[in-house]
Image (spheres, coloured by chain):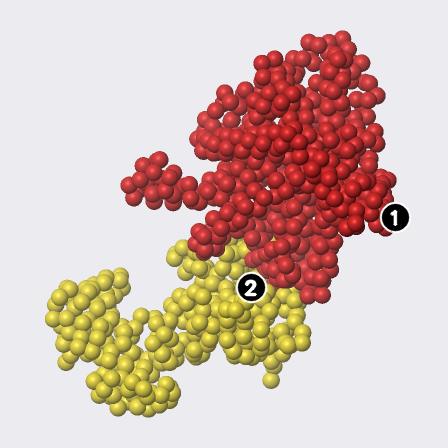
Chain colours: A red, B yellow
Amino acid sequence: MALAAITVVLVPLFVLARTVWVEGGADLVEILTSAGLVTAVRNTFVLAVAVTVLAVPLGTLIALALRRPDLPGRSFWRVAVLLPVLVPDFVLGYSWLRAYGRAGFTDDVFGLHWLGVQGALGVTVVVTVNAVPLVYLITAVGLAARAEPAMERAARVSGAGVLTVLRTITLPLIRPATATAAVLVFVLTLGTFAIPQVMGSPAGFTTISTRIYSNLARSSDPLAFVEAVTLALLLVVIAVIVVAPADALLGPRLRVRRVASTDPSSASGGRTASRWTVLAGIAGYCLLAVGLPLLALLATAVTKAVGLPPTPPNWTLDNFTLIITSRSAEALTRSLGLAACAASILVLLGGLVAALERRRSGRSVATLVTLTLVLPGSTLALGMIIAYGRWIGGTLTIILLAYIAKLWAVAHRPISGALDRLPPDELHASRISGAGPLTTIRTVVLRPLAPALLAAWLVCFLTALHEVTMSSLLYGPGSETLAVVVLNSAELGQVGATSALSVVITLVLLVPALAFWFVIRRLNRAPNHGTAVTSTDRAPELAHAG
Amino acid sequence: MPADPLEIRGLTVAYGEVTALAEVDLNVAPGEVLALLGPSGSGKSTLLHTVAGFHPPRAGEVWLNGRCVSCATSSVPPERRELAMVFQNYALWPHLTALDTVSYPARRRGEKRAHARAQAQRILERLNIGHLAERHPAELSGGEQQRVGLARALAREASLYLFDEPTAHLDTHVRGVFLEELVTRQRDTGAAAVYAAHDAEESLGLADRVALLAAGRVIQVGTPQQVYDEPVSQLAAQLTGPSSVLTTTDGGELLVRPEWARLGGDRSARIGDVFFRGPHSDYLLDTTQGRVLLREPGPPRQRRGDEVTWSLRHSWPLRVRPGSGSDAEQRCRTGVKVPVVDDPHVPHGVGT
């Protein structure tokens, strides 16, 4: 286990540092002070700060709003706000261009377009939209775990109004969750590649990730390569500088121990008049941020040419027939196989680490795995190229290896969380009833763990299908993934084909995602009738655990 | 005449399709402690939560001190109902120390921080937990947590206290101490209180009046002695303490509390089981009229299987004849004529 972690994480990092040291040498100062590099670093940092500042309050607000039991269509909106998770980020970025940019949907229909959508402002907004579901998920879990209705009721009965309760009780209670969300959003934004590449690069807005990508494209220039490696290391350094103090400060509080119920609901609804305002806010956000862009994307995909209004007379399927080539079909098969393979390996590894974590000796591996969460994809990919490129460069193996390194933590977290929630007495009861360790796992552990295992598999599968940051750096002839095909197509300016491809990849994601989602829901529902009772029984423990 | 601290009229509460409370009428007089006694799921918590304003009723009214806080047209939010509440799960805020928790209500009244804290410290001292002021809930035991919960309620300085099974999660020995504390402090304030519990001994001991709740309906209201000695039904009898039911020769049913029967006398029975309970022993007798639980002071004097004699000192008619009405008055009246009663000089319904 430790060996696997070292192979995919530590070795690539080590060779990066060595490369900068050996090859950079005398030129290092020159590289570090070059205007292009300084701009990229500044842009990246400002982007990460801006997105964190925007996404955290927005996501928290949505989580609070969706807690109201009286909100009309609450279960629908809960899924709707998570939609950006299912849409690959480059598709989201591209669809925003198609919706609000020049010759986009609003331009064609209303004559309105927004120049800033291509450039720094557009990138900031779309990365924020992409990050909001993450913040929402983390704070919603925080709300469910820590802000029990009784806490807020006690405050209300003590004389605090709705807003005072929010200020003095609810928000302080979920502060660990919001802090976690802020750190994660910041780090993930540092490493974000697809949206800046699709929306920013055409307007000359560069970030560290996009600069690494363009530097590698000019692979003949040795100085550009060293600069890329330096940037990759800088990315890690910035991430660590931010995460290390946050982790030390928040420490154990970052780990939410036990979730009483994943269905947060507030103590008592506010006035009935305001719920329509809340509903309008959420609906408007979903429509403008995700709904309209995706519609615009679909409209572009079925319209004959750019600039024509997306009305039925101009509809055609030409764009789709155009992209049905052996190349894209192969890429699709490759992507699906790669993602399924990575997800299966990751669930296995994640489960092993989660189990090991419960023993003292396994802790360091778990910590290392969590660290991969903050490791930017560009850095990891570059490290992989230098460390293993000689033997497996440009093959599917190196891409698979990179996926495993990047997504290990993603698989580990839900499984570890589910193990945490498994009451030890249930295991003891099985053992005392005569079951051996393996029988215990098979009969009493696997079933309650099944939703988490499936969820971990699904998240890994989807993320691997989305993945473009590492794939675009690592692919070679014959190992292009579908996401890379879409990205290349976008860069070539093939509007119709890119839109059609984006629609296809989104649908490819949507189908398994929805299927799995239903299975996980059903699995969760069946035994949860029992847990509903136990969760109230555990409430006092929760109060202790706080 | 001053208005009652609490008056509930025709209160009906539903969670979706499920009716949790049906047409409940109750009132609490100034300084009175009303116990809500019922099995879990009978609607005790729902009643308290509706009074506090956490849950809107489907029908009915809630009046606090002559002010309608929940009517068809208007509803006062919880923070302006001026109630104090002690929660079953303590409901302590994990991010606040005991002192900050207890000064919270005063702060919400707009008092200065220093003043609120000084006040809170005094309350904590009174409850003998002054030394725990700087601790967070996670660093307190269950009993200490619930004392902080009680202190927070006291700090509210309300005229009505709601206790939602405050001892449900406490160990037996802590429960007794806490309960004593709670009753003393509540009496000190002179405020009225509604105390929800499922433990009969606890609620009979502390209440001025008891309301028996079953399946969302109030089945009986009376003094603790009334509900114990004269339950309106077998369910009411079971809620208020141990009891057994004898079938009379004419098909009626008689309620017998364990201490209403004695060993020795003119009736014969076989000992079905014996339980040593410390200060007394319980005997389960198999008689021709059914099983009777009988209580005698001291350790067991008989063994299982022994043939013994026993006598009934007192009983309460639940039902005279199958099919005859359920009117309590009729039961009282006809009960006297029931032939199995040994001592006709002891009037029915009077305590032993």
Mark whose residue sits in front, 2 or 1: 1
Would you say the residues marked 2 and 1 are in contact, meaning their CB atoms lie under 8 Å apart? Answer: no
The answer for how far apart the CA atoms under marks 2 and 1 are is 60 Å
Q: In the figure, is residue B24 to the left or right of A272? A: left
Subunit of label 1:
A
Residue type pointed to by label 1: Gly
Return the residue at label 2.
Answer: B85
Q: Provide the secondary structure element on which disc 1 rests.
A: loop
* Residue visible at 50% across and 41% down in the picture: A454
Q: Chain of mark 2?
A: B
- Relative depth, front residue between B156 and B85: B85
Q: Is residue A134 visible?
A: no
Q: Position of residue A125 (x, y in %)?
A: 77, 41
Q: Amino acid at mark 2?
A: Met
Q: Vertically, is B327 above or below A378?
A: below
Q: Is residue A420 left or right of residue A491?
A: left
- How many numbered discs sit on the rendered protein? 2
Q: Residues within 10 Å of mark 1 (few under 14, many from 20)?
A: few
Please name the residue shown 77% across and 36% down the image.
A495
Which is more toward the observer, B229 or A293? Answer: A293
